[in-house]
Amino acid sequence: MTDNPVASPFDDLAVTVQVAEPLAGHTWLGVGGPARYFCEPTSIESLSAVAARCHEQEIKLRIVGGGSNILASTDGVDAMVVRLAAPAFCGIAIDGQSVKVGAGAKLVHLVSETVQAGLSGLEDLVGIPGTVGGGLVGNAAAHGSNLGQRVHSVTVMLPDGSTEERLREDLAFSSGWSSLDGVIVLSARFDLDSDDPGRLTKRMQKQWIVERSEQPSGTRAVAMMFKDPVGTTAESLIAQAGCRDLCVGGASVYAAHANYVVVEAGCASSDVKQLLEKVRGVVRDRLGVELAPRIRVW
Ligand SMILES: Cc1cc2nc3c(=O)[nH]c(=O)nc-3n(C[C@H](O)[C@H](O)[C@H](O)COP(=O)(O)OP(=O)(O)OC[C@H]3O[C@@H](n4cnc5c(N)ncnc54)[C@H](O)[C@@H]3O)c2cc1C
């Protein structure tokens, strides 16, 4: 973070707010302009105060998790961007077959801790980058499992800074989507099954190898472009439409795994955006399929 003494509407709150914080360092792609405001609250109370202030002053509030599914605009993001990386948002507590986890915890940590504790249900999700909060909002999925399947309840913060618990029956999850868009996910409880830790560890390690083989290697400057349509994969459609070699400026389709965009140093966020539009247009024109973006464009 940069030290910035510029005044902000949050100056009277017990939270350090950065003005014009570069977002490139908070996303996997490493591109994009600054956030108008940025903070990392250390408690639910300070997050609540920030949310309430944004609500009162009509300042948009956005949460960045691991930043593996965000494309920040070249022109910057006119919002308060909040990162829930403080210990208050990252705890993992196991109680029998129930696990309570903070939204800022890394998904990979949740998976490995539950596997070590002999709890099954999340091991297929090993290797998906990002946080539990980001994974719940976009219903992270791999190898036929998704994060929403095992949710018991989710604690959320509403725009006015109040909190509420939403039970499974009040939540909806589908491919690349959940009904949690528009609220701040604070924590979640998952119901898991007991299993043999040794067997689970082997299964997790196998899935990890498969997951890594399906991802671009050697760089973190990548993102998944589109959701898989029902009955097929975005990757196969992109390849079939002949888009493996497409590039715009410093952004190109990763040929070996065609649903990923990879960026070179110095690439502009607008290059990535244009590449997404180009791929989408070619797939539409050649195959008549409208791909839905997975990556969130800010
Ligand atoms: C190499 C690579 C491999 C991937 N493999 C997979 C895969 O196998 N399966 C899959 O499903 N996805 C995959 N993805 C996509 C991505 O990792 C997932 O979507 C992941 O769940 C995003 O989590 P994140 O914490 O990084 O979210 P971010 O990118 O930080 O945010 C994504 C969205 O969630 C919102 N958000 C984040 N946290 C919160 C919160 N606490 N409250 C409210 N909103 C929040 C953000 O505002 C944003 O709108 C992959 C991405 C990469 C780069």
Image (spheres, rainbow, N blue to C red):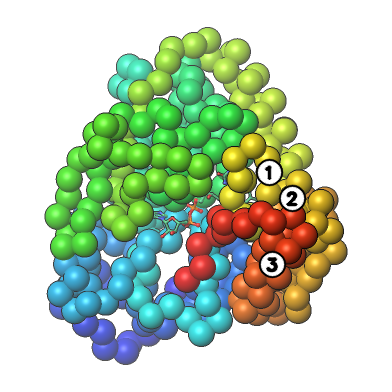
Q: Which mark is residue 237?
A: 2
Residue 166, above or below 59: above
Question: Left of 6 or right of it: where is 262?
Answer: right
Dividing the picture into quarters, in which one does residue 77 lie? bottom left
Find out if the beta carbon at label 1 lies less than 8 Å from the nearest ligand 1 atom: no
Mark 3 burial class by Cα count in 10 Å: few <14, some 14-19, many 20+: some
Of callouts 3 and 2, which one flags the residue occurring earlier in the amino acid sequence?
A: 2
Q: Which residue is mark 1?
A: 233
Asked if the residue at tag 2 contacts the one at tag 1, i.e. Cβ–Cβ closer than 8 Å, the answer is yes
**Residue 157 horizontal/vertical position (percent):** 22, 53
Q: Secondary structure at mark 3?
A: helix
From this viewpoint, is residue 109 visible?
no
Q: Which residue is mark 3?
A: 281
Identify the residue at image location x=52%, y=72%: 72
Q: Secondary structure at mark 2?
A: helix
Identify the residue at image location x=57%, y=59%: 293
Gap in angstroms between the C-alphas marked 3 and 1: 17 Å
**Residue 42 horizontal/vertical position (percent):** 28, 58
**Residue 213 horizontal/vertical position (percent):** 76, 39
Mark 2 burial class by Cα count in 10 Å: few <14, some 14-19, many 20+: many
Of callouts 3 and 1, which one flags the residue occurring earlier in the amino acid sequence?
A: 1
Residue 106, above or below 50: above
Mark 1 burial class by Cα count in 10 Å: few <14, some 14-19, many 20+: some
Identify the residue at image location x=54%, y=30%: 145
Nearest to the eye among marks 3 and 1: give it.
3
